[in-house]
Image (cartoon, grey):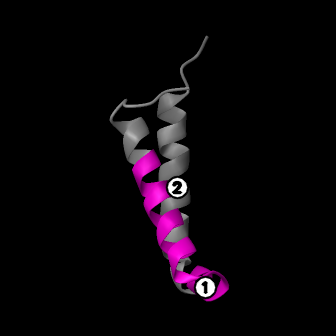
Amino acid sequence: MECLRRHSAKTLGLWAQNYEDHSAEIARLVDDTTFRVWRICLARCAGAFEQNWVSL
């Protein structure tokens, strides 16, 4: 069975970057709490996979 940790780290990193690239538009669509939670979640999940703290 293939470990998807490396792929997940890359995917989440790209999603986090895309979120940052479009942050002004996203901030207009959601409340501040939702905006901050998703920003932190994407960045921390990417970091957790990169550090091998979680795996799939």
Residue at image location 53% in from the left, 20% down from the top: 3
Image spot of residue 24 (x, y percent)? 54, 86
User: In the rendered structure, which segment of residues is drawn in magenta?
Assistant: 25-45
Type of amino acid at the residue the image marks with label 2: Leu
Point out the image quarter for the C terminus.
Answer: top right
**Neighbour tally class for label 2: few under 14, some 14-19, many 20 plus, Cα within 10 Å:** some
Looking at this rendering, what residue extends furthest in the right direction?
A: 29
**Neighbour tally class for label 1: few under 14, some 14-19, many 20 plus, Cα within 10 Å:** few
Vertical order, 46 against 35 (above or below) = above
**Is label 2 in contact with label 1 (beta carbons under 8 Å)?**
no
Looking at this rendering, what residue extends furthest in the left direction?
A: 51
Image spot of residue 41 (x, y percent)? 48, 56
Residue at image location 66% in from the left, 84% down from the top: 29
Vertical order, 53 against 26 (above or below) = above
Look at mark 2 in the image and give the residue it sits on.
Answer: 14
Image spot of residue 28 (x, y percent)? 61, 89
User: How would you classify the magenta stretch by its main secondary structure?
Assistant: helix
Residue 25 horizontal side relative to residue 49, left or right = right
Look at mark 1 in the image and give the residue it sits on.
Answer: 25
Residue at image location 43% in from the left, 37% down from the top: 49
Vertical order, 51 against 19 (above or below) = above
Type of amino acid at the residue the image marks with label 1: Glu
Decide whether residue 55 is among the magenta residues: no
Residue at image location 47% in from the left, 41% down from the top: 9
Point out the image quarter for the N terminus.
Answer: top right
Decide whether residue 42 is among the magenta residues: yes
The local secondary structure at tag 1 comes to helix
Image spot of residue 46 (x, y percent)? 44, 47
Looking at this rendering, what residue extends furthest in the front direction?
A: 33
The local secondary structure at tag 2 comes to helix
Looking at this rendering, what residue extends furthest in the top direction?
A: 1
Vertical order, 52 against 18 (above or below) = above
